[in-house]
Amino acid sequence: MFNVFSNIFQNGFPGMPSFIGESRENINAAGVVRIDNTTVSEQTIISGILNCQNSFLNSLQVTGTTNISHTTINTGVFVGLLVAKNCIFNDNMRVTSNEVNMKTCSLKDVVVSDQNPSVDQLVLLSGDTVVEGNINFISGRGKVILEDNAVVNGQVIGGNIERRSNFRFGFF
């Protein structure tokens, strides 16, 4: 039984597209997709859920949920929830979502389009995240929440900034 679960965590579920330790020109996949320690020199297009770590993706487009860590992305277009940790976005990023969560990331300009016009859009920046340029909320209903040492060096257009302290309950 342990070997079966160990295999799933290392290689993904059967039928789940996984790209581990590869160098590829393009990836076009759907479903729950795992990319780990992989370089994609051209386009990566995902429909579904992307779990990606320790990779380089030249151009990434995701329709669905994106969970990425320790990854460098030159250009990114995201439709759906985006959660990133320790990532570098080398060029402008476009997001159509009501929630974006970045922890210790480096970004240029960010354009946030509304996924649901009746809901405010939230961009949470924490850790040592740095946005070198602007964050532009197309809907005009955006909020950037800064925690820890996160900073926006440009302007927030169509929204406002709120600084939150990182007070935590419990024992450390």
Image (tube, grey):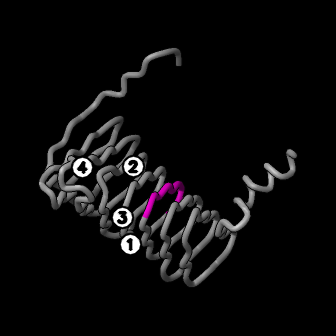
Which residues make up the magenta segment? 64-71
Left-right relation of 148 to 111: right
Query: Residue at the spot x=50%, y=72% of the render?
Result: 57
Above or below, 4 against 165 in this view is below
What residue is drawn where x is 54% and y is 69%?
56
Label 4 Cα crowd, 10 Å radius (few <14 / some 14-19 / many 20+): many
Identify the residue under disc 4.
Answer: 121
**How many angstroms separate mark 3 from mark 2 (CA)?**
15 Å
Reply above or below: 13 against 152.
Answer: below
Which numbered tag is attached to residue 79? Answer: 3
Read off the residue under disc 2: 102
Residue found at x 39% / y 54%: 81
User: Tags 3 and 2 in contact by the CB under 8 Å rule?
Assistant: no
SS at badge 2: strand
Determine the CA span between mark 4 and mark 1. 21 Å
Q: Callout 3: few (<14), some (14-19), or many (20+) C-alpha neighbours within 10 Å?
A: many
Magenta-colored stretch includes residue 95: no
Image height of 23 relative to 117, above or below:
below
The residue type indicated by label 3 comes to Val
Residue on which the image places disc 1: 75
Separation of residues labelled 3 and 1 (CA atoms): 14 Å
State if disc 4 and disc 2 touch (CB < 8 Å).
Answer: no
Type of the residue with mark 1: Thr
In the rendered image, residue 7, in percent from the top left (x then y), is placed at: 80, 56
What secondary structure is the magenta-colored segment mainly? strand
Label 4 sits on what residue type? Answer: Gln
Camera-side mark, 3 or 2: 3
